[in-house]
Amino acid sequence: MSAGDADTRGAVLAVPKLAPIAETDMEFYRRKQKSVTVRHVSGDRVVAMVEIVSPGNKAARNAMRAFVEKAAELLSKGIHLLIIDLFPPGKRDPQGIHGEIWQELAGKEYAAPAEKPLTMAAYETGNTLRAYVIHAAVGEVLAEMPLFLAPQQAVTVALEATYCAAFAEVPRRWRKLLESPRT
């Protein structure tokens, strides 16, 4: 239906005459949020999730809060979690995403190393909650991380190999742009 056409209720669709006074790209960031859900074969029960932090998760206080609350809720339901945060800490997560999640879960402060601002955190749920955290710096090889499927039972997620395989599929012109030195 084009502008000026009537819809089924007899109203006329038209382009608004007012100009917007504000606009945000938040929907672009929301589309970039990524997660993988692992379900048990019997009953289709969720046992684990992999969450890849996006700029949208850190873009606003409410988005950060929603991410932290979601992580806490998943863990409280016994769902194991692997979080990959390859964006440096900001004003909403000064000690990294794990620091925010740990504060929410345990009420304890966490001090991330300043020289390694990127965070990979695997959470194992069971009678206790365990956090396995590795920090990295830009340019370092990404560590292999456990993705727990049950208490004390995990599969290894080869983050560097996965990243390299995905990057190899990026069109050559974009790879060249991404690999060129910043000026």
Image (spheres, rainbow, N blue to C red):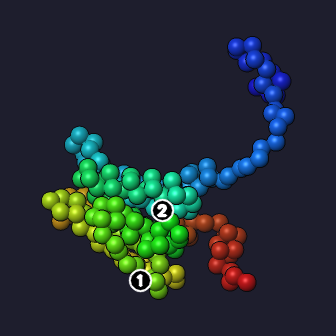
Task: Report, in whole angstroms, how far the alpha carbon at label 1 lies from the one at label 2.
Answer: 19 Å
Whole-percent x and y of residue 58? Answer: 53, 62
Neighbourhood count class around disc 2 (C-alpha, 10 Å): few under 14, some 14–19, many 20 upward: many
Q: Which residue is mark 1?
A: 113
Decide if residue 183 is on the left or right side of residue 169: right
Residue 3 figure quarter? top right
Q: Height in image: 91 above or below 59?
A: below
The N terminus: image quadrant: top right
Q: Residue at x 47, y 78 (%)?
A: 117
Q: Residue furthest bottom?
A: 115
Give left or right: position of 173 versus 119: right
Rendering coords of residue 167 (x, y %) = 55, 69
Q: Position of residue 155 (x, y in %)?
A: 27, 65
Q: Is residue 145 visible?
A: no
Residue at the spot x=52%, y=81% of the render? 138
Question: Looking at the image, which residue is at 67% across and 69% down?
Answer: 174
- The residue nearer to you, when weighing 95 against 10, is 95
Q: Is residue 12 above or below residue 91?
A: above
Q: Where does residue 83 sit, x and y in percent of width and height?
A: 39, 64
Up-down: is 10 above or below 170? above
Name the residue at 68% across, 75% down: 176
Q: Which residue in the structure is indicated by mark 2?
A: 53
